[in-house]
Image: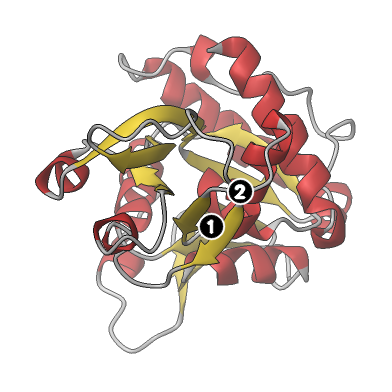
């Protein structure tokens, strides 16, 4: 990529938070803040070009090597999978996957096969597989809270930030499935070809995160330096990856 790195940023709040972080690192992100009709935005004072994309596309671009790096939520990583390095927890975009039911429902107090609605069937399937439970999973694209309200399902698995939407619809979270936050991912080939540049970028990110009062190093991912990172499992094996990761999280909580 002609000596310049290329990073894919998830559109929306993660994009805004990424730009804030990069500007604290000293990068001039004016082209990203005022993109006009351009689709690739060159950072003028650092060898980095930024593209804006939907979360699943960020993984696609990084996995296929058209972008060296990406910023994407852990929710998308767990659901979509892919072959790339997940190198840093950026600390923003924090929320959680939660299992929620109608208030007063005893979800675990029955032997019948439960129905669960979710926009994230892979995460949901792995969560219940860890429990040894057989559930029927119904994928919902819109407002997943409607499923238990209309008695389509017994529960939902969805991303919860404040819980206000659940409460407004008579639902309550009964279990945390997994924590979620923004992650920095790297293409596996780029890690070898642009090792020094990528290490410099990661070091700059870490240095700024260390200065952030609300984000201590204990909250960052305990990962070794470039060259020994292990890539995320390819998509066909993502169920094993998700199950293993969920097990690790449950041990820490």
Residue 113 percent across, percent down from the top left: 59, 48
Q: Is residue 9 something that shows in the picture?
A: yes
Question: Which percent across, then down, holds residue 164?
Answer: 15, 41
Of 157 and 105, which appears nearest the observer?
Answer: 105
Place residue 187 in its image quadrant. Answer: bottom right
Residue holding disc 1: 120
Query: The N terminus appears in which quarter of the rendering?
Result: bottom right
Indicate the quadrant where residue 102 lies: top left
- Look at the picture and state if 3 lies above or below 111: below
Rendered image coloring scheme: secondary structure
Residue at (31, 62) in percent of width and height? 12
Crowd tier of the residue under label 1, counting other residues whose Cα lies within 10 Å: few below 14, some 14–19, many 20 or above: many
Q: Does the CB distance between marks 1 and 2 fall below 8 Å? A: yes
Q: Is residue 219 above or below residue 241?
A: above
Helix, strand or loop for disc 1: loop
- For the residue pair 204 and 189, the one nearer the viewer reads as 189
Residue at 35%, 54% (x, y): give it. Answer: 28
Residue 49 seen anywhere in this rendered image of the structure = no
Please rate how many residues cluster around mark 2, counting C-alpha atoms within 10 Å: few if below 14, some from 14 to 19, many from 20: many
Question: Farthest residue toward the bottom?
Answer: 37
Q: Nearer the viewer, residue 183 or 74?
A: 74
The vertical placement of 139 against 96, above or below, is below
Query: Tag 2's secondary structure?
Result: helix
Residue located at (49% from left, 30% from top): 108
In this image, 193 relative to 206: left or right?
right
- Residue annotated with mark 2: 123
Residue 199 at x, y percent in the picture: 70, 36
* Horizontal relation, residue 51 to residue 185: left or right: left
Residue 129 rendering spot, x and y as whole percentages: 72, 39
Task: Judge left or right: residue 35 versus residue 113.
Answer: left
* Inter-mark Cα distance, 1 to 2: 6 Å
Q: Is residue 50 left or right of residue 104?
A: right
């Amino acid at each position: 990529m002609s000596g310049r790195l290329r990073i894919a940023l998830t559109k929306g709040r993660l994009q805004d938070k990424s730009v804030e972080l990069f500007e604290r690192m000293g990068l001039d992100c004016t082209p990203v803040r005022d993109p006009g009709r351009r689709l690739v935005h060159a950072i003028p004072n650092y060898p980095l070009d930024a593209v804006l994309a939907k979360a699943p596309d960020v993984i696609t671009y990084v996995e296929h090597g058209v972008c060296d790096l990406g910023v994407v939520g852990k929710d998308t990583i767990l659901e979509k999978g892919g072959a790339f390095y997940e190198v840093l927890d950026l600390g923003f975009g924090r929320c959680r996957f939660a299992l929620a039911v109608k208030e007063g429902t005893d979800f675990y107090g029955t032997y019948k096969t439960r129905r669960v609605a979710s926009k994230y069937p892979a995460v949901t399937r792995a969560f219940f597989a860890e429990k040894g439970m057989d559930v029927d999973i119904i994928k919902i694209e819109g407002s997943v809270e409607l499923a238990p309200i209309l008695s389509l399902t017994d529960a939902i698995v969805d991303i919860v930030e404040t819980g206000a939407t659940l409460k407004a619809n008579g639902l309550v979270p009964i279990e945390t499935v997994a924590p979620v936050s923004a992650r920095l991912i790297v293409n596996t080939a780029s890690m070898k070809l642009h090792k020094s540049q990528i290490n410099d970028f990661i070091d700059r990110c870490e240095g700024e995160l260390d200065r952030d009062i609300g984000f201590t190093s204990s909250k960052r991912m305990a990962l070794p330096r470039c060259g020994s990172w292990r890539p995320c499992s390819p998509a066909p094996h993502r169920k094993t990856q998700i199950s293993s990761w969920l097990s690790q999280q449950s041990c820490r909580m």
